[in-house]
Structures are given as C-alpha cells and as structure tokens.
Image (cartoon, rainbow, N blue to C red):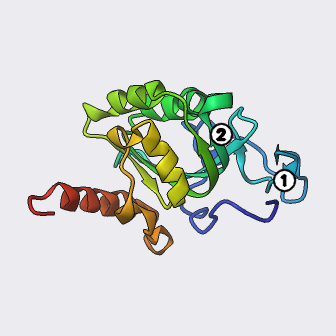
Amino acid sequence: MHNIEPYYNWKDIYSADEDELSPFYKRKYSEFEFTNTIYNYYIHPQWDDIGSSTLFIKILFVDYSSCSAVIELMGEWNDALHNDIMILKREVIDILIENKITRFILIGENVLNFHASDDCYYEEWYEDISDEGGWIAAVNFREHVYAEMRTVHLEHYMYMGEKFSTLNWRTVKPQYLPDLIESILLKRLAPGE
C-alpha cells in the first residue's frame, strides 16, 4: 500500500497545501518518511490524514469559480466503526462548502471497502448543496463498494453506478471534469435514457 500515491499530474494546476481556503493549507509532506498506516500497512506520505484511522484523502483540485472539488480517497471507508463520513464532512467538506463548493467528485479507485451505518451525514451534505444546484458524484468505486453504499440508499444523495464506475477521469483536464460529470447527469435525466 505504501506505493499507492494520490494522483499527482494536476499538482502544477492545484495544490491544497498552497490554497489558503483549503483545510490542508501549509501542510508539509515528506517523500521519504512514512508515518500513516491503515491496519499496520504504511501508506504513501502524500495522502492527507483527516482524523480517521482507515480513510485518507487528497484534494486533487478545487475551482472556486465553478464551485467544484475533486477528492481522491484511499483505504477503508468505515462509517460503522469509525463514523468516517462524520469526520470527512466536518473536517473537509464543511470547509469547502463554506467556500461555496457545491459540486463534489469523489474518486474511489483506492477505497478497498465500505462499511455502512446510517445516512444522516450524507443527507446533511446533500441538503447543504442541493439548493445551489450542487451534487456529489462517486467515481470509479469498486462494484462491491457501490453495492454496500446502496444498502443504506446512498444513491439518494450521490450519483453512482455504471456511467461513473468506468470513467477515465485522468484524460480530462481538471477544470473540465465537473462539466463532464454534469453532462452525464443530464443524459441520465433526459427522457428516454
């Protein structure tokens, strides 16, 4: 697990540690000192610790003019034992929402498992952004993770599924990714689709 890095090809466009509005502003990273672990396995030091013992993130891109953020996740998303959604919502999402972010793209390729609890924080997140036309898209999560998310009906609060599970988001410039997601959403809502 220590060699799984957050996506870094957009670092010249956006870096959360240089963004004054980011919850990770002025955070220092090491390339060589591995300190964070998930179940005794060291993870790459570029992942951001949000206060969960199993879920780490990286804010890959934020565009305040388009009210959008791209967040990559790593590890085990465990709401049942660690209430990871509460930690993510309070430590990261609320700060972004305060700064007018309403379109969230969650990249889940490196989320190994999801353990559900209830949907209260997801509902709150959705309510915080829906009046502004906001949305949450769960992109490229593993099928068993999507399946577990559906057990508590998270599809009511975030977009997920086939059109999002194989999206080649790395080929899109980050400033265009929210529009690509929105175009998929519009096609899903179009009559006859």
| Image quarter of the N terminus | bottom right
Query: Looking at the picture, how far across and down is residue 156, in whole percent?
Result: 33, 39
| Image quarter of the C terminus | bottom left
Q: Which residue is mark 1?
A: 30
Query: Looking at the picture, how far across and down is residue 76, in whole percent?
Result: 67, 46
Q: Residue at x 66, y 59 (%)?
A: 6
Residue 177, compared with residue 148, is above or below; it is below
Who is closer to the viewer here, 70 or 81? 81
Q: What SS does tag 1 mark?
A: loop
Q: Earlier in the sequence, mark 1 or mark 2?
A: 2
Can residue 141 be seen?
A: no
Q: Residue at x 38, y 57 (%)?
A: 161
Query: Looking at the picture, how far across and down is residue 47, in whole percent?
Result: 72, 50
Q: Residue at x 80, y 54 (%)?
A: 43
The kind of residue on which mark 2 rests is: Phe
Q: Which residue is mark 2?
A: 24
**Residue 152 sits in which quadrant?**
top left
10 Å neighbourhood of mark 2: few (<14), some, or many (≥20)? Answer: many
Residue 86, compared with residue 45, is above or below; it is above
The kind of residue on which mark 1 rests is: Ser
10 Å neighbourhood of mark 1: few (<14), some, or many (≥20)? Answer: few
